[in-house]
Amino acid sequence: MKTTDYAKIAHKYEKNQYRFDEVKFDDDLKTYIDHNPQSTYQVLDLACGIGIYLENQIKNFDKFDINWYGLDASEEMLSKAKEKLEHVTLLCDLAENLPCENESFDYISNNYAFHHFLNKGAVLDEVYRVLRQNGVYRMHNIAIHNMKNWWVYHYFPTAYEDDLKRFWEKEVIFNELSSRGFEVNLRMEYRLEKVKVSDYLEYAENREISILTLISDQDYQEGLEKMRDEVKINPDKTIVNDFAEMFCISRKM
Ligand SMILES: C[S@@+](CC[C@H](N)C(=O)[O-])C[C@H]1O[C@@H](n2cnc3c(N)ncnc32)[C@H](O)[C@@H]1O
């Protein structure tokens, strides 16, 4: 499986405003807190990147006594996280080998990262090990098997072939978690809509969407030229775009 070098794109990651805009109040964390009243909580954001989730939720949950942790394999991503986060323990390590005691977390979030893990089974074993009983693992990601018409695959078709090698289907995720002793609740959000190509050109040019770093430069340039040409001919050009997100909430039984 190909891997994205985040050392090379950490500086571009913050330029993608979508990554900030899409982070919502974490209702699943609120549900966990409501059902498990405790004086303090230990929350880990696994593969936290530049700290977008943590920055948001720390504000959202400021009424609660939560010790926040972030872990990521990339020092460069973590150094961006450090710039925006205070009072968060940041760890540079692999999700496959967590430097944490057994049963040390109440809640683990994991956003847009599961497809990057080279040994996904080992990550799930580690998540299970470091969660307390009744603790929750929330995996959130795009669901590419329901996104064949995503604008990225429309303009960069080889990206889909590569992504099929990185992403697990939802049934596999469900079964792998269930077989490890999690009670799994997986939900999907899906939308199909026409989008203006010009709105996505900037994202394509930034080339920080991980799959665009993995396709060949030639495939990337061809797709980019096609987008630019189409926008030049018709600035209002639209395409049909589908977008699916998976929220997989797993409780350690
Ligand atoms: C697309 S980014 C997502 C970052 C963040 N969760 C967010 O939502 O913005 C993927 C992140 O996974 C990290 N990553 C990839 N493989 C990893 C691994 N094996 N262990 C820990 N982090 C990893 C990368 O360094 C990168 O920061």
Image (cartoon, grey):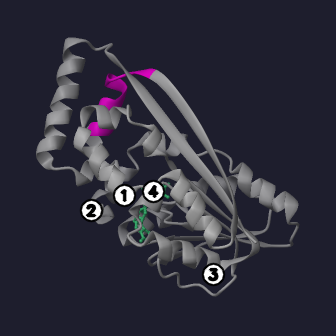
Amino acid type assigned to the residue bearing label 2 in the image: Lys
- Which residue is tagged 3? 129
* Magenta span: 194-204
Measure how far apart labels 2 and 3 are at the Cα level. 27 Å
Q: Position of residue 246 (x, y in %)?
A: 56, 47
Q: Which residue is mark 4?
A: 168
Give the class, few, some or many, for how many residues have Cα within 10 Å of label 3's Cα (few <14, many ≥20): some
The residue identified by callout 1 is 166
Callout 1 amino acid = Arg
Nearer to us: label 3 or label 4:
4
Of mark 1 and mark 2, the one earlier in the sequence is 2
Which numbered disc, 2 or 4, marks the residue that appears first in the sequence?
Answer: 2
Circle 4: is it few (<14), some (14-19), or many (20+) Cα within 10 Å?
some
Determine whether the residue tagged by mark 4 lies in a helix, strand or loop. loop
**The residue tagged with tag 1: helix, strand or loop?**
helix
Q: Quadrant of ligand 1?
A: bottom left
* Label 1 packing within 10 angstroms: few (<14), some (14-19), many (20+): many
Compared to residue 237, the image places residue 246 above or below, namely below
Answer yes or no: is residue 212 visible: yes
Q: Earlier in the sequence, mark 2 or mark 3?
A: 2
Disc 1 versus disc 3: distance between alpha carbons? Answer: 24 Å
Q: Nearer the viewer, residue 107 or 133?
A: 133
- Pointer 1 and pointer 2: residues touching (CB < 8 Å)? yes
* Tag 3: amino acid: Arg
Residue 141 at what x, y percent from top left? Answer: 51, 51
Residue at image mark 2: 2
* Mark 1 vs mark 2, CA separation in Å: 8 Å
Q: Is residue 29 left or right of residue 235?
A: right
Q: Secondary structure at mark 2?
A: loop
> Which kind of residue does numbered mark 4 sit on?
Trp
